[in-house]
Amino acid sequence: MASAFAQVSTDQAYQRFQQRVQDRQTAAAQPTAPQIDRIAALDAETARLLDLVADLRRQVDALRQAATAVAPTTQPVVASTGYRYRTVTTQPTAAPSPAPAATEDKTPGVEHVGPRGGVYHYSKNGNKVYEKRR
């Protein structure tokens, strides 16, 4: 029974292997037309996004400069020293507090989740009753 494969020296086999590797590397290094189009589209998108980032940075810098240019309003704090009053320091006035959140549903039997994950409900008399952890 004759072998289907001819006997090849190891040097020849290694040279063929190197040639195949080199052919594959040159084929992979040269992009095809669809790949070139996709690369061009990605380059254009990258340029657009970089312009957008630069524009946003300019806007942030402008807002920071505007915020530092506005001096906070201050009002004097008066301290009592016996029979005289004198101005000690100035403190910024408090900013108006945001509108209060909607009132919570205090219907008995409705479960709520607290700020740290505790589950509670309101009893009939209006007290919070936390569930036991399991």
Image: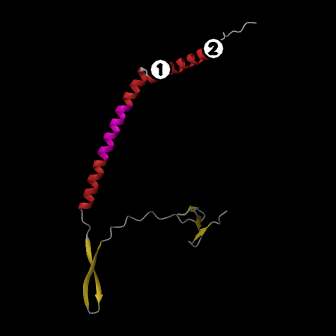
Residue 85: x and y in percent read: 25, 87
**Residue linked to disc 1:** 27
Tag 2's secondary structure?
loop
Task: Locate the C terminus and report the quarter of the image it occupies.
Answer: bottom right
How far apart are the alpha carbons under marks 2 and 1? 27 Å
Residue 45 in the magenta stretch? The answer is yes
Which residue: 27% across, 59% down?
A: 67
What residue is rendered at 26% in x and 93% in y?
83
**Residue 23: where, in percent of width, then height?**
50, 18
What amino acid is at disc 2? Ser
19 sits to left or right of 134 = left
If you read the primary sequence from the N terminus, does the residue marked by circle 2 or circle 1 appear first?
2
User: Which quadrant of the structure image shows residue 91?
Assistant: bottom left
Q: Residue furthest top?
A: 1
* Residue at 60% from the left image edge and 67% from the top image edge: 130
x and y, in percent, of residue 10 in the image: 62, 17
Please name the colour scheme applied to the rendered image.
secondary structure
Position of residue 47 in the picture relative to residue 110 (left or right)? left
Circles 2 and 1 in contact, beta carbons < 8 Å: no
For the record, the magenta segment spans 42-56
Of residues 112 and 87, the one drawn nearer to the viewer in this rendering: 87
Identify residue type, mark 1.
Answer: Ala
Q: Which residue is drawn at 36% across and 36% down?
A: 46
Q: Label 2, on which residue? A: 9
Image position of 60 with respect to 72: above or below: above
Residue 2, percent from left and from top:
73, 6
